[in-house]
Amino acid sequence: MKKEDKSVIIWLLSGCFLLFLMVTVGGITRLTNSGLSMTDWHLITDTFPPLTEAKWNAAFEEYKKFPEYQKINVHNDFQLDDYKFIYFWEWFHRFIGRIIGMVFIIPFVYFLIKKRLSGETIKKCIVLLAMGGFQGFLGWFMVRSGLIDNPDVSHFRLSLHLTFAFITFAYTLWVALDLLYPNKAEVIIPLRKLASITLVFLLIQIIYGGFVAGLNAGLIHNHWPLMSDGQLIHDSVFIEQKTVFLNLVEGKSGVQFIHRTMAYVVVGLILALYFKSKKYSLSAIQQKGINSLVIIVFIQFGLGVFTLLFSVPLWLGLAHQITAFFLLTAMTFSLHRLSK
């Protein structure tokens, strides 16, 4: 690491931490059904929550105009205090997004003025800024889907929002690693290819994790290793929707089946990477990266099983999502160290 790059690396890793925090709070927002509590979006005026009781009541009355209240919460003796609770998590989620924007833009301008960024790093940072802006759009695009007729957001949009946050985090970490390890590592092509394939399947698993969350598909077939009725592939996997494809992307049973099956694939690929790495002489940092992958993937697998068995309690669902973040971190780090 070059001494002059230290502050830039700290800046990028701070962005990684904030992205991790935002996804964590996003998970709480989803698991507490708070995501539709703020029915509009303003860059400035909703930076802070309502500060008077009159403003709280006005926000609550506005919320009552939308499907979530009219079709669900109106039947649950839903009061202003309940609204304040769900409002807080959605507001906090958006607030962290604003902080991330400032943390990226202000230091970026400062580093530009001080000429602390190389031309290549400037290009990467511009991509990061664009990704951040697009992520904000995806957030509102997702919320909008639950404010029209259906009091649930589209599981496709939720998964897109979630997955793109993971990708933005991974790319930010990759840019930081480029600066942290300026000297090229020995590239072992077979391991790099396998690690790349593993990353692709991990991202597919994250996409399906979003589908499961968006469809509440973790609340059915709460058995393992088999699905309900002692079936490996439950009959409902193929009968909820009109076609096999729709069953596997829109059916609750089909989506859960893919997600639980893909977990075995990800574990298998990471184990294959681990055992294949034993055939090569790796640096200590490369081996530590792969070892961490094995440990984290088994923790994640176990959390996934218990989350399913206990019908997605808040703390387990959140722990499962957080560990997915750690797994992607280890995967990104390992691939970087096997590639550059």
Image (cartoon, grey):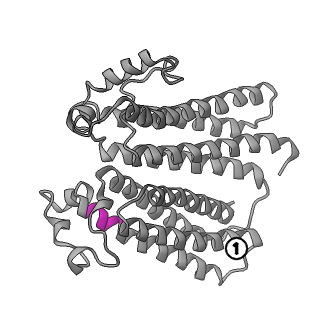
In the depicted structure, whether residue 269 falls above or below residue 56: below
**Residue 294, picture quadrant:** bottom right
Check disc 1 and give the amino acid type. Answer: Gln
Is the magenta region chiefly helix, strand or loop? Answer: helix
Q: Element at badge 1? A: helix
In this orientation, which residue lies closer to the viewer: 147 or 327?
Answer: 147
Q: Which residue lies at the image location 13% right of the left edge and 63% below the top edge? A: 239
Residue 309 image position (x, y, % from top left): 36, 70
Q: Which residue lies at the image location 22% right of the left edge and 57% below the top edge? A: 251
Q: Which residue lies at the image location 27% right of the left edge and 35% below the top edge? A: 68
Magenta span contains residue 134: no
In this orientation, which residue lies closer to the viewer: 186 or 195?
Answer: 195
Q: Is residue 252 left or right of residue 160?
A: left
One can see residue 281 in this view = yes
In this orientation, which residue lies closer to the viewer: 180 or 231?
Answer: 231
One can see residue 138 in this view = no
Q: Is residue 182 left or right of residue 17?
A: right
Q: Which residue lies at the image location 32% right of the left edge and 66% below the top edge? A: 258
**Residue 218, picture quadrant:** bottom left
- Number of numbered markers: 1
Give the residue furthest to the right.
3
Residue annotated with mark 1: 287
Q: Quadrant of the C terminus?
A: bottom right
Residue 230 image position (x, y, % from top left): 23, 80
Crowding near the residue tagged with mark 1, few <14, some 14–19, many ≥20 C-alpha atoms within 10 Å: some
Q: Magenta stretch?
A: 254-259
